Image (cartoon, rainbow, N blue to C red):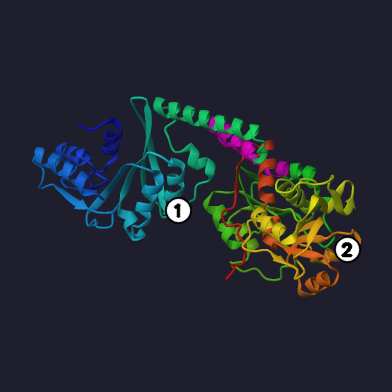
């Protein structure tokens, strides 16, 4: 009666109570669970009358109408949960399955075993399950004809846990099973094709990331010494070049001084530390120092307290990252070059020495109205808005930029004969001076001009340490909202 994928679903049903078959279609699964004796009661639901009518014919054929309740329901909306032990959702997209589960009150999760067979977006579904406080306890790969199907079994997990991207792709298979190995090979083939396409398109950051995922799918993650990571970062972004007032470096150690997972963020907030802990992260690398001013008192909400409590190390790279060739401002230069054509090679804005500089000056190949530039900057930095000088309606070509809070460099931009300055966190007096000196200032936000460097950091780390599970924090967010 059942095809191989539905048979695999049936085998995972606990039989401890009522099973619910969502999107039942012909009620074959419901009938099998009753006829096999595994369940004494099944609820079969569907969002449409047609499939329910087909289900009714199956139930009547096997004379089990008294043991199968047919319910017209959008997902689980109209399902009574009393004595329900298992919910089967098979043959739908991963996003649809996640949406159905999201509409269930979380207090009902504890009693339910979820048996899920997604047709698409399997990685997405795995991550969402952990967002719902569910844990994948087993997975099976079933081959039917020329297709491979993944069947997931998940149960309530009282301990918070989030999946990384790599974990959501790798899944939770028994690697010794032949179909699981075959499925893994298909995943690798898919990623290898993606890698080649990205490399050919010149998308280096994305290509390196995919290549790192391929490495881990083949070999798993491996432990790397935090001091080794620090030394590598010191080669790329020398810590001794930081400003005297700065505090970059290894600011918090963990007990073992090694890691297999790294989380990247602009700021180490309490929320970022919680994410790191839930992902099993051993090291956070941030742009802004987690210790800047002297700490005279520690509270549980203080990030330094939380890092030590959760045994998470922290490396912070601030001004040394800003001035490095491929650091914060180097990333902005690359982003601008993808949207604008330059008349000549970029020149350093403020030279630090040793081949390092703070910001760049670019010259557009033709003068452009500044309001058109502002529109492109909004796209480049993905910011809510761009603030600009009141004199903004003018044509400009020579533009200086400095990430973060660079309003104090307006006078320097004037000395360098720039028409405009791109930065963030511009103060009132800078706006006044800009208008008085006929220089256009674009304020794209402190966060938005610095956050893009995280993707460059991920590329650098994954290129050197493909065995590390490197994530960009989902909670590396602009600390303000806009109304």
Q: Residue at x 10, y 46 (%)?
A: 65
Would you say residue 208 sits in the magenta stretch?
Answer: yes
Instruction: State whether residue 17 appears in this view.
Output: no
Q: Secondary structure at mark 1?
A: helix
Q: Which residues are magenta?
A: 206-229
Task: Left or right? Give the position of 350 relative to 376.
Answer: right
Residue 434 on the magenta segment: no
Q: Earlier in the sequence, mark 1 or mark 2?
A: 1
Element on which disc 2 rests = helix
Residue in the image at 42% along x and 54% along y: 133
Q: Is residue 419 visible?
A: yes
Q: Position of residue 86 (x, y in %)?
A: 27, 47
Look at 28% across and 54% down and name the residue there.
74
Please state if 137 lies on the left or on the right of 418 as rendered. left
Residue 75 picture location, percent across and down: 30, 52
Name the residue beneath numbered marker 2. Answer: 414
Residue 49 % position (x, y): 20, 49
Q: Is residue 127 rendered to the left or right of residue 108?
A: right
Picture quarter with the C terminus: bottom right
Q: Count up the numbered dots.
A: 2
The quarter holding residue 119 reads top left
Query: Mark 1 to mark 2: distance in Å?
Result: 50 Å
Disc marking residue 304: none
As drawn, 481 above or below 373: below
Up the image or down, 295 lies above or below 337; here it is: below
Q: Which residue position is annotated with label 1?
A: 131
Disc 2: CA contacts within 10 A as few (<14), some (14-19) or many (>=20): some
Residue at the extreme left of the image, as rendered = 63
Q: Crowding at label 1, few (<14), some or many (≥20) Cα neighbours within 10 Å?
A: some
**Discs 1/2, front:** 2
């Amino acid at each position: 009666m059942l095809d191989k994928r539905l048979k695999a679903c049936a085998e995972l049903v606990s039989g401890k109570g009522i099973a619910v078959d969502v999107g039942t279609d012909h009620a074959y699964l419901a009938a099998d669970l009753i006829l096999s004796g595994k369940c004494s009661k099944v609820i079969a639901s569907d969002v449409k009358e047609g499939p329910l009518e087909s289900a009714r014919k199956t139930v009547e054929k096997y004379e089990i109408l008294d043991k199968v309740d047919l319910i017209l329901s959008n997902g689980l909306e109209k399902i009574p949960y009393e004595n329900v032990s298992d919910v089967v959702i098979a043959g739908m997209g991963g996003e649809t399955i996640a949406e159905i589960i999201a509409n269930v009150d979380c207090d009902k999760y504890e009693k339910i075993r979820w048996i899920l067979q997604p047709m698409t977006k399997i990685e997405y579904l795995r991550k969402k399950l952990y967002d719902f406080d569910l844990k994948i306890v087993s997975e099976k790969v079933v081959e039917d004809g020329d297709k491979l199907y993944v069947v997931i079994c998940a149960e309530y997990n009282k301990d918070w846990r989030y999946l990384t991207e790599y974990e959501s792709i790798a899944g939770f298979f028994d690697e010794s099973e032949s179909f699981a190995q075959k499925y893994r090979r298909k995943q690798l083939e898919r990623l290898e094709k993606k890698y080649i396409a990205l490399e050919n398109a010149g998308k280096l950051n994305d290509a390196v990331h995919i290549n790192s995922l391929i490495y881990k799918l083949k070999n798993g993650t491996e432990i790397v010494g935090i001091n080794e990571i620090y030394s590598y970062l010191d080669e790329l972004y020398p810590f001794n070049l930081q400003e005297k007032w700065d505090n970059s470096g290894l600011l918090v150690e963990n007990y073992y001084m090694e890691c297999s997972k790294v989380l990247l963020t602009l700021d180490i907030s309490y929320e970022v530390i919680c994410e790191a802990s839930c992902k099993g992260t051993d090291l956070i690398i941030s742009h802004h120092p987690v210790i800047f001013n002297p700490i005279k008192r520690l509270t549980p909400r203080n990030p330094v307290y939380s890092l030590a409590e959760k045994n998470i190390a922290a490396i912070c790279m601030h001004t040394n990252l800003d001035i490095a060739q491929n650091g914060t401002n180097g990333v902005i230069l690359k982003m601008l070059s993808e949207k604008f054509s330059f008349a000549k090679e970029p020149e350093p804005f403020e030279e630090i020495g040793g081949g390092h500089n703070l910001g760049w000056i670019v010259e557009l190949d033709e003068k452009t109205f500044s309001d058109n530039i502002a529109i492109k900057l909004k796209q480049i930095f993905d910011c809510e808005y761009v603030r600009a000088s009141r004199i903004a309606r003018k044509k400009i070509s020579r533009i200086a930029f400095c990430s973060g809070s660079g309003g104090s460099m307006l006078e320097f931009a004037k000395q360098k004969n720039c028409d405009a300055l791109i930065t963030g966190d511009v103060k009132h007096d800078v706006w006044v001076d800009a208008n008085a000196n006929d220089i256009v200032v674009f304020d794209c936000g402190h966060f938005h001009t610095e956050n893009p460097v995280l993707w460059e950091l991920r590329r650098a780390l994954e290129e050197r340490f493909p065995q590390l599970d490197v994530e960009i924090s989902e909670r590396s967010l602009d600390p303000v909202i806009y109304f």
